Image (cartoon, helix red, strand yellow):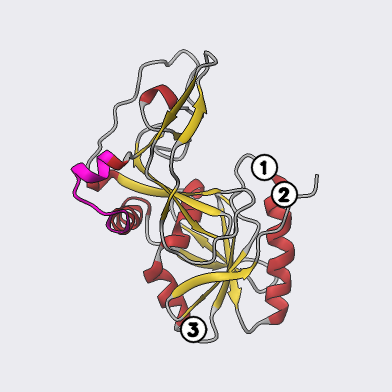
Amino acid sequence: MKHLLRSLCAWGAMLAVTTGAPAADTEPERFDVSAQNLLVVLRESPGANKQDEALEPFGKIKAKLSDGREIEFEASWFQYLGDMHLRLVFDGERRVQSASPEDLEKLRLSPEQALARAVDNLRRRYGQPVAAPWSGGLMQVQGNSPELDSSYFLDRAFWLDQLRHSPAGLVAAVPGRGGLVFAKADDSAAIASLRFSAAALFVSNDRTRISSGLYLFKDGRWSVFQPPQPVID
């Protein structure tokens, strides 16, 4: 299905990576770099434990190319919360491409405005998130592209709507790209189930994991509920 197989490339086609595409397909993919094509993805920041949601620029990023050369570049990546950072990207058929700071300048968008646009685009293109019963009293958040389900953590309108049914707050886990689960903050049994399930999902796949922490949504904002846990090999 279109858009379901994707991976992140850094700024520029030379860092693009495909998933599910034939090995012989080496033609560079062209990206629509308009505001209507912005998306946002969450990724892990190992060892971090940021305490607020303010977008903090990631800074210079180093990468090694397939020929062994190392390059340094800037992308619209921001430290976000706990051990998570977010990346503003342009959507493609097989890949996504990171937006650069210059891209946002051309679009006349601040990082916060670009994030809001990216979430709107996510809902428009991949459907509004749905909360479905999972196990142990937990709810799972799903859209129409499993690999982007974690991005709905950034959909504040969705969480505000869920909060109407749980005034005490909501506790969520984002263990992997296709995993976003939550429980009512005043349901101790469900929180215990969330701790166990999130930890198991986080350690089960180091390639697609995102966060080992738990997060509380209350009063319209996210905070760290349980600090990210070190991975024990």
**Crowd tier of the residue under label 2, counting other residues whose Cα lies within 10 Å: few below 14, some 14–19, many 20 or above:** some
Camera sees residue 6: no
Identified at 50% across, 87% down, the residue is 167
Look at the numbered discs 3 and 2 and tell me whether their residues touch, using CB distance below 8 Å.
no
Element type at mark 3: loop
Q: Identify the mark at residue 2; answer none if there is no mark.
A: none
Look at the numbered discs 2 and 1 and tell me whether their residues touch, using CB distance below 8 Å.
yes
Disc 3/disc 1 C-alpha distance (Å): 34 Å
Please tell me whether residue 35 is drawn above or below residue 32 in the rendered image: below
Q: Identify the mark at residue 203; answer none if there is no mark.
A: 2
- Using residue 80 as the reference point, say whether residue 175 is left or right of it: right
The outermost residue toward the right is 233
Task: Name the spot of residue 139 as percent of width and height, x first.
Answer: 58, 69
Disc 3/disc 2 C-alpha distance (Å): 31 Å
Element type at mark 2: helix
Task: Name the spot of residue 116 as percent of width and height, x first.
Answer: 31, 59
**Residue hosting label 1:** 206
Camera sees residue 169: yes
Sequence-first tag of 3 and 1: 3
Task: Name the spot of residue 95 as percent of width and height, x first.
Answer: 41, 33
Under mark 1, the amino acid is: Asp
Please tell me whether residue 115 is drawn above or below residue 89 in the rendered image: below
Disc 2/disc 1 C-alpha distance (Å): 6 Å
Residue bounds of the magenta highlight: 102-113
Look at the numbered discs 3 and 1 and tell me whether their residues touch, using CB distance below 8 Å.
no
Identified at 45% across, 81% down, the residue is 219
